[in-house]
Image (spheres, coloured by chain):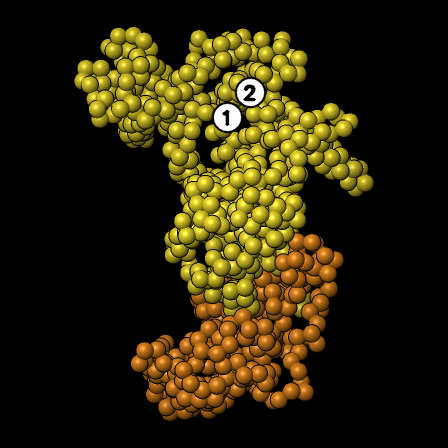
Chain colours: A orange, B yellow
Amino acid sequence: METHAIDPQAMMGDEGGARLLLEAHKVTKQFEGLTANRDIDFDIPRNAIVAIIGPNGAGKTTFFNQLTGIYAPTSGSISFDGVDITGMQPHEVAELGTARTYQNIRLFQNMTAIANVQVGRHVRMRGQWFHAIFGTPSIRREEEEVLQRARELLELVGLRRRTENELAKNLSYGDQRRLEVARALASDPKLLLLDEPTAGMNPGETRQMTDFIGRLRRELRLTILLIEHDMKVVMGVSERITVLDYGEKIAEGEPAEIRANPRVIEAYLGKQATA
Amino acid sequence: MRGSASQLRRAISLGLITGAVMLYLVAVGIVLAFSARNTITGVVTLGRLMLAAPPLAAGYVVARRGTDLAPRLVAGLLLGAVSGVIVAAALLFASAVDIRHILVRISPPLLAFLAFDQDASIGALLNLALAAALGLIGAVAAVVPSRVRRPAITGVIGVVVISMLEPFLRPRLTDFKLEGVSRFLFTHKGLSIASAIVVFAIFAVGSVAWPRVRARYRARVAAADPGTQATIRGVTLLLLIVFLLALPQIAGSFLSQVLVFVGLYTLLALGLNIVVGYAGLLDLGYVAFYAVGSYLTALLTSPISSLGVGLPFWVALPIVILGAAVTGLFIGAPVLRLRGDYLAIVTLGFGEIARLLFLSDALKPWFGGTQGILGVPPLFGVAKVSVPILGWQLTGPTLTYYPLLFFCVIAAIVATRLKYSRIGRAWNAMREDEDVAQATGVNVTNYKLLAFALGASVGCLGGAVFATHLASVFPGTFNILVSITVLSIIILGGMGSIPGVVVGALALIGLPELLREFAEFKLLVYGGVLVLMMLLRPEGLLPDRVRQQELHEADEEEEPGADGGALTPAEQG
């Protein structure tokens, strides 16, 4: 088995493009009078690891869902890799090169591990129903490639070979988290969005996960956005942190700055610092 | 001892339930209806066996638990006795008080049957004794090792099945100049005692021998070199094809008619399987596509339809498929946003709308209202085909069988290929979690529409063939029961499983056609079968490998070292 089978070049963003992979301008989201996000300006430089933090209910997930097309912003605009994605459908945003994981793992429970990853590859496949029905050589080749690729990805995230035909729901918690990452990586994303990737993990597992995130950026040249409510997790791994509170951006900067920012301490860290 | 006390309590409560089930079977009339069928002439009828089945099965269930022999057997006996007491009490009550105005089926012949043609009090005692004995036999079956139980059960099933097939086997055996076999097997519409013993023995021995023969055969195939394996596969496939082609000739005209129904419903179920089994869209209005296939075929091919173009079937077929696919899109589009129960209700409505449209006076100039469309020519343009060398004369069902077989094979291949492709996986993902599937890049809208359109295209083939088979179409054929029957076939066979669909169609369509007495109780039996399946084997008779795992993961052992989830991103990387 080749260990460096995943070619970093294949996943690399267009280095010649703009410096910013994602730009959000004055994004506002209202739910029947409740303003979940207000005038948020946010961007992600290519090949960076950035984090959005904030206490529970700060509007992190709402913002995240607008980046991935699940909600359309009430006002403001979002562009990804030079394309205006404001109001696009989730599958369209995914096709442009984003992939995500979920805070409370959401795998395709009753499908095998390998099939989960194969579905993750969906947007990069071209086979249509008529190809499938007639079993054309092109679709056979594509299927073989995808199977091969899915196996490589399972290996990359550290899932043992024999688990590939297990149903996703029968995997252990840690394996399910890894499988979710493999599924997200399968689409060759430019931007990987991780929603509380260390939720439910002990300190040891958390450290392994943050190491792994760093490795993904290095080896696959990925740009990564983390969402966390636990500030300690993101301090080590991300180079820029954005803090949301009550739906507004209250601070942005390097981890050291954020740690020292009085508004952040007041809104968020204050309780923890005194605890 | 507390364990055995609770076992006895369980025996009593199960006995009460068993007694109630027996009374129910008696009161709906199903037992008496089948008492005209001899299983072993002069010994036992099918009706009697039906009444015997509940205490047998319950005795087996109650005695499966426990370690000590005596309490288990006592539990079975007690259970049988309790159920017998209920039946006996009911018999005495019904003999003393006339309750026919409430339960119309409780007729004097029924009471006489129940009392073994004896006086009511003697009959009651006989029932009590018999039920107790059956409960005990059931318990014994649970106690003996499975190498004894399996052959015994297989033998009994063999006797019942062979006796049920008597009306069809006998004339066929005569046709094939095997009157001797026929005369030995059957007397007075049932097996003779001697033949019953022989049949029992053959099946019992077969159940022991078959797995061994198969295992040895498989081992030899596995040991052979790849070239030989390919040859074996080819020959097996060839034999299967020859068998399927010759089947109507072996089965004769009546059984061919049954096969045509089975084939029709297999085709419908293969189509619905795409929608329900793969994509997880619970469509209760599937009959609409069957209707569209039938009506379009009739319109296009019948010279006396409103169109009057009289196209040949094979020319009309592509138009029919296209029409059905478009109908699938029309029905699919408004329900795209609906999920689960809501989807089921709305599609149910669409199914009825389709039927009412074809029935309506407004569209009578097109579809003929209640009169339907007549004059649909036979599928090959002629009513009779002679096969030169073999000397076969194909007419009616023996002729319709072939296109149905052809379409079923095509549909099965299409379904299999879709299942193991990007498309099938996208459908499965959608079934599992629509939101995540979309976020993963599946265009949910398109894939739902595709499922409806492809499901409709397969379903319309059934309608097309059937219109030519009956030479006419009537709106009455396309009622909600068709949708429900097709769905039942899928559930019985196993969602998403293609062999399961065939088995489901054989069981739910083939069996009732063979047992004419069933007709009246068909829906009752369907309901009972579905409830039992959901309780005992929710994955279906012949489940998909993955789906079986899904419903029985609790049975599997926890694998040691399946790990508590420390994240170890590939050290080799």
Q: Is residue A219 above or below residue B38?
A: below
Q: Tag 1's secondary structure?
A: helix
Q: Tag 2's secondary structure?
A: helix
Three-letter code, disc 2: Phe
Q: Residue drawn 58% across and 47% down? A: B308
Q: On the picture, is B251 further left or further right than B122?
A: right
- How many numbered marks does the figure carry? 2
Q: Is residue B182 above or below residue B65?
A: above
Q: Is residue B456 above or below residue A270?
A: above
Three-letter code, disc 1: Leu
Q: Residue drawn 54% across and 45% down? A: B305
Q: Is residue B368 above or below residue A142?
A: above
Which quadrant does the N terminus of chain B fall into? top left
Q: Residue drawn 56% across and 50% down? A: B307
* Front position in the image: B374 or A89: B374
Which quadrant does the C terminus of chain B fall into? bottom right
Q: Please, which chain is the residue tagged with disc 2 on?
A: B
* Residue B387 falls in image quadrant: top right
Q: Which mark is residue B514?
A: 1
Residue B48: x %, y % from top left: 39, 17
Q: Residue drawn 49% across and 13% down? A: B189
Residues under numbered marks 1 and 2 in contact, where contact means CB atoms less than 8 Å apart? yes
Q: On the picture, is B393 further left or further right than B464?
A: right
* Residue B113 falls in image quadrant: top left
Cα separation between marks 1 and 2: 8 Å
**Residue position for label 2:** B168
Residue A165: x %, y % from top left: 59, 52
* Front position in the image: A237 or A247: A247
Instruction: Please tell me how crowded label 1 is: few (under 14), some (14-19), or many (20+) other residues with Cα within 10 Å.
Output: some
Residue B147: x %, y % from top left: 54, 23
Residue A148: x %, y % from top left: 69, 60
